[in-house]
Amino acid sequence: MPDQQITFRPVKVRVAGQTEGQLAFAGDDLVAVLVKLDDSHGDLQGRWYAEAAFNSLERMEDSTFETLDEAAIWITKWLHH
């Protein structure tokens, strides 16, 4: 996949009480679904978690992020791995 900007689109996600989510796209391709962790996750509250990832991103490791920019860097890294 050539270098493509990672963009996000807000979405509600119903998973384990989470609702705030973001769809992550590389160009027109959906590559991940991120959810914002709530207070039930202790120290991880407020971080973004890759709830689902596709293609080469399926090897999720270190998949919580402080910001969406941090998530975009991670996604780009794994798309070119």
Image (spheres, rainbow, N blue to C red):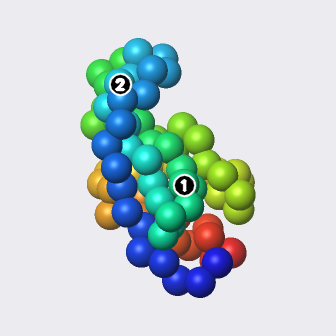
In primary-sequence order, the first of circles 1 and 2 is 2
Give x and y (percent) for residue 1. 64, 78
Query: In this rendering, would 8 be left or right of 78?
Result: left
Mark 1 belongs to which amino acid? Leu
Who's the residue at 37% across and 18% down the image?
Answer: 40
> Which image quadrant for residue 72?
bottom left
Q: Looking at the picture, does residue 20 appear above or below residue 60? A: above
Kindly report which numbered mark, 1 or 2, lies closer to the viewer in this rendering.
1
Residue 19 is marked as 2
Mark 2, residues whose alpha carbon is within 10 Å: few (<14), some, or many (≥20)? some
Who's the residue at 61% across and 68% down the image?
Answer: 78
SS class, disc 1: strand
Query: In this rendering, would 68 be left or right of 27?
Result: left
| Residue furthest out toward the bottom | 2
Q: CA separation, marks 1 and 2?
A: 19 Å
Residue 30 is marked as 1
Who's the residue at 50% across and 64% down the image?
Answer: 28
Mark 2 belongs to which amino acid? Thr
Give x and y (percent) for residue 16. 48, 17
Give x and y (percent) for residue 33. 50, 43
Give x and y (percent) for residue 51. 54, 38
SS class, disc 2: strand
64 or 57: nearer the viewer: 57
61 or 76: nearer the viewer: 76
Q: Taking the image as drawn, is residue 37 in sight?
A: no
Who's the residue at 49% across and 21% down the image?
Answer: 15
Q: Looking at the picture, does residue 13 appear above or below residue 65? A: above
Residue 15 is marked as none
48 or 8: nearer the viewer: 8
Q: Quadrant of the C terminus?
A: bottom right
